[in-house]
Amino acid sequence: MGDANTVLDAASARHLLRRTGFGAAPKNLQRILDGGLTRGQAADQLIAFKGKNFTPKGKYIDNAHDRWVKFMIKAKYPLQEKLVLFWHDHFATSNVKVQNVRTMGLQIRLMHIMCKGSFKDFVKAMNRDAAMIEFLDTVRNHKDIPNENYARELQELFTLGVHDFAGNPNYKQEDIVQIARALTGWDYEYNTGISRFHDYDHDYNADFLADRGPKVIYQSTGGFGAGGRAFDVNGEGAQEIDTVIDIIFDHTDTNGKNTVARRTARRLLEYFAHPINDPISPADVAVVDQVVAESGFDANWNIGGLLRAIFVNDAFYETAAPEPFTGSTKKSVKWPIDYVVTTLRLLGVNLASKFPYVDGGDYQRIRDQLTSMGQTLLEPPSVFGWDWESSWISSATLLARYNFATDIVSARNGSKSTAFHPERFIQLTLTDPDDILAAVTDALGITDQLTAAERNALVDYLTDGGANPTLDLNDYDTRNRKLHGLFALVLQSPAYQLH
Amino acid sequence: MAITRRQFIKRTGAVAAGTLLGPSLFSNPLLRKALADTIGDRYFIVVYLDGGNDGLNTVTPATNGGGTLRDAYDAARLTGGGGLNLSPGDLASTHIGTDPNTGAQIALHPGLIGLKNLWDLGKLAVVQGCGYPDYSLSHDQSRSIWQTANPLGLTGGWVGRYLAANYGGSEIPAVNIADSVVGEFKTAATSIITLDRLEDFGFPYDEFDGGSDDGFKRTAFLALCNAASGNAQSVVKYIGDSGNATLLGSESYPGLHSLYENDRGTIWDPQYDAVGRSLANDLREVAKVIYGVTQGVPNVNARFFQVRNGGYDTHSDQGAAQTDGQHYGLHRELGDSLNVFYQDCADMGVANKVCIVVWSEFSRRIQQNDSGTDHGSQAPVFVIGGAVRGGPSGGSHGGVYGNHPNIDDTALDDEGNTVYKQGADPFRSTDLRDVYGTILKHWLGMTDPGDVLTADGGDPDFYWTSPNFDLGFL
């Protein structure tokens, strides 16, 4: 057990780096250990990033996709990218429907800007985000032809959740209808992505009228009492969609706790710490309430503060140590994008060409490889985002990961920056297979994650089943066969699919 | 996907994950159990004609019968240079059944010699006028609608939804001869192998030294998977189990090539080679897998397949009956390939166990342009197999099901395309979901196809509000 003042050991430091970034690079690990950093100090340093307001652009969506992946591979502050990926999943918007590279890019830019600031401001900004207005049909939501899509998902997915922790509904159908009315009158300019409120009081086109009538929500949920909350100060117009958010963020659940704060904290815990079962266990509820209380998230809505509370909590470090795995240890599966970017970053391998691929294997475009692994950025499968954890894994997606691993280690002949150079990570004078294995797992940041059986399997591989107890890595053939082979096996190992 | 270097000869294959589009309908185990239907010992093959095949010059009225289809056809499809008119003489040797609505004599394009042969054998059914409401002229959008069978929104593919309901994550029930999982097979809940050629498919070893280290790599990989399989944590165990299954699958499939070549190549390779086109070669890969299943090759259980053929976007130089024309060549490729494949299956003893469905994302405009045709709407679908009610004695109109679209100039919409009709209209269209539903119910053993096909709301004259999963061709 520990707290913010607990000094990080190697396993915990690697865990922190893996979860908050793309892999535990030896030099970053060393910095934490040399500095004797505590959980709190390390978390503060990570969260303090002054990130870039990156905008994925391109003629086609796959160009934007590739630029974003390349940006992640070079990103100075990987936590920013990990957060943007979380929000991209949370506010899942797909270009398959939006069909506008520019507005999709602007949404990802917005997420870069808002990713660790005020969650309340973030949701208000998403209300007005052009890609979202298109994706969830706000643009098709008019006084006389209401469309409830956004009003439903705003509550179900972005803020409240369908049920609270006690299993009681957080809202009713009538609340969806009322909120949809508040969201009428909006559209956006296709080329600029600028969203606009149309106060068409005198417009002959009644279809596009904003609904200005009185509205009341949460008369039976939310802890507002039988009167609910009205947000129809007549003539409020464009401000109504902000008022709606203010009310939603005041919503309390049947335990009397702030509903949005609890659900958001739970989601971030699931993403950064470990999977949480449904219905949520009392122990997990306690963790959620603890990080909300410690950070004051239910009043200040500061995402960075909530992250700090998570990154110093024991729950976050529960899966840092590998042994012994028990039925209750909740290991987490790397997302495909995490698998790819982590590997490229740790091994210092750059993608080649304008249609980027790993410079080995059969030059399959990285976007196609990610699609085969089950994740096409900017095209989440639905408004629910991607299914996490074991849903990432099938024979199908695994072979895509295995292919990628083999592509990396066979990138022998590319340019200096696109080729794989194992000698950068390991002294070729090493001859003991245990030392060689340790050097490779250190480079890939999972030294603490291998079980004894897995280590034995890999040592057996290096020694050809014990036949050759030492290796001469200065020998070209031995190095290319066994050292490249070992890297591939570790990248393909079950342990490396987890983090 | 070309093999670019010798050392990568074994890794052009990929098993790709389908992406689940839409809510995880089948993550609920109760629902999954309720849908546990079975294809049994049968096979299902989807053939996709990419680009929008001109249905009007595929399934063509040779006479008026009791209506005016032929007159309308002659008014729109011109004769002479660039003309696309298939004359009654051109069609004389490829007559099939009659149009259920007008009684017009229906004929296949003269290039579809292979399909005519299957018709004569009673193995080909033609479903005319298949489409969906509010049709799209976009290749992407219309293809996606045919694949999801859901004009209303985004969900997984129609075959994929069936597979997700009936197969687990480590099973491999389907093979696509493609670079990645095709739309109608998309699903998150099971594994689909995508490959180009079986002999090139396999576990991706780094082939630095020509494979001499592969045995050690394999041993180590299996040991890693087995270590994970023994783990107390379910997610670790799942990754270990799946890795194990993946390796075994990747080892079982490449051998299907040599198995087929050894046992059947002498007789059948020359026949596929005589067609000499990519569709024939792709279908031969499917035949190899089917043969492997019939021979009980371990870890080979695929029963669902997809192949595609491209080139149907004939905006210009389409050609009519000329044997050197573009469309004629495509039809020869399609008919001849399917004919050989069917004969091959018959020779394997599974004629009555295969069902092939051929579709395209739309038909083409009735009124031709200079020398080609622009995007259209409802299109014919072919259904082929030993158990299909096809050919001269297939049904009341032979194996012709569904009405020919109304191509009379006065009946066309603003785009100049035929109109999707439901209700009591004499030219009522066949909704693609009725076609799929009939296959799901009568071939894939699904008790209620309504579980994966959702009816429309809206005007029953223009929307699919009353499903009919008994079209009769199966």
Image (cartoon, grey):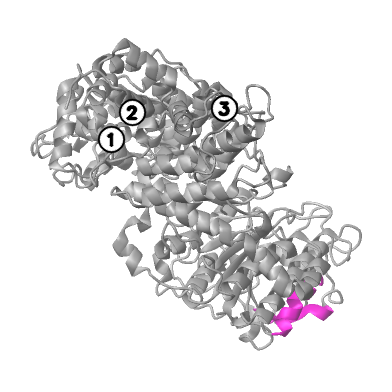
Are dots 3 and 2 on a single chain?
A: yes
Q: Amino acid at mark 1?
A: Thr
Give the residue drawn at x 33%, y 69%.
Answer: B34
Image coords of residue B432 (percent x, y): 55, 65
Q: Residues within 10 Å of mark 1 (few under 14, many from 20)?
A: many
Helix, strand or loop for disc 3? helix
Residue B279 drawn above or below residue B180? below
- Sequence-wise first label, 1 or 2: 2
Q: Amino acid at mark 2?
A: His
The residue at which mark 3 appears reads as: A422
Image coords of residue A25 (percent x, y): 44, 23
Q: Is residue A182 left or right of residue B212?
A: left
Nearer mark to the viewer, of 1 and 3: 3
Q: Is residue B41 left or right of residue B374?
A: left
Q: Nearer the viewer, residue A358 or B71?
A: A358
The residue at which mark 1 appears reads as: A319
**Is residue A80 among the parts visible in the rendering?**
yes
Q: Which residues are magenta?
A: B92-121
Image coords of residue A126 (percent x, y): 37, 28
Could you tell me which chain the residue with mark 3 belongs to?
Answer: A
Could you tell me which chain the residue with mark 2 belongs to?
Answer: A
The residue at which mark 2 appears reads as: A15
Residue B107 shown in magenta = yes
Q: Is residue A274 left or right of residue B466?
A: left
Measure the C-alpha gap from mark 1 to mark 2. Answer: 8 Å
Quarter location, residue A429: top right
Residue A62 shown in magenta = no
- Sequence-wise first label, 1 or 3: 1
Query: What is the number of callouts on the image?
Result: 3
Residue B3 drawn above or below residue B260? above
